[in-house]
Image (tube, rainbow, N blue to C red):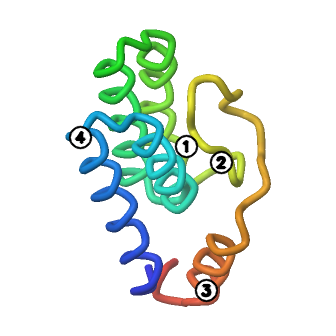
Amino acid sequence: MNAALQLAIEQALQQAEHAMQERRSADAFRWLERAHILTQRQPLLHARSHWLMLALGWQIGDYREVAGQIPRIFAALLFSKIWVPIGNTGRSKISAFRPMPVPEELQKLLVNDDQNPSSR
């Protein structure tokens, strides 16, 4: 993984956790969605983004989010290297199979990582 992508993932996860601590759920979900898009091909980090979405769902009493994240955690661990719906934000309100547009700034990070031979 290239340094810029790694830094962006760390920042997104840290910002999400900070927003969760401050009970700013909308901000936390935005950061987690960003982290999810960036980590889709990395099983442990991908599962971590889903775990944090589950924890945030629990924190705000959104049990649909909690229930939807449980199978996504297992799928992230099992299928991230095989197939992912590119750009999917990872939320339970979105089909787990639906590809979505990747924001341009994230595309640049992901394209640079795909071109980095050490990321494979």
**Disc on res. 29:** none
Q: Residues within 10 Å of mark 3 (few under 14, many from 20)?
A: some
Q: Which residue is at a point 46% across and 56% down the rendered structure image?
A: 35
The residue pinned by badge 3 equals: 112
Q: Residues within 10 Å of mark 2 (few under 14, many from 20)?
A: some
| Residue at mark 2 to residue at mark 3: CA–CA distance | 18 Å
Q: Which residue is at a point 56% across and 81% down the rendered structure image?
A: 113
In primary-sequence order, the first of circles 2 and 3 is 2
- Position of residue 91 measured from the top left corner of the image (x, y, whole percent): 56, 32
- Position of residue 118 measured from the top left corner of the image (x, y, whole percent): 46, 87
Q: Residues within 10 Å of mark 1 (few under 14, many from 20)?
A: some
The residue pinned by badge 2 equals: 84
Mark 3 belongs to which amino acid? Asn
Question: CB atoms at circles 2 and 1 under 8 Å apart?
Answer: yes
| Residue at mark 3 to residue at mark 4: CA–CA distance | 33 Å
The residue pinned by badge 4 equals: 22
- Position of residue 25 measured from the top left corner of the image (x, y, whole percent): 40, 34
In primary-sequence order, the first of circles 3 and 4 is 4
| Residue at mark 3 to residue at mark 1: CA–CA distance | 22 Å
**Disc on res. 79:** 1
In the displayed structure, 73 sits above or below 58; it is below
Give the number of callouts: 4
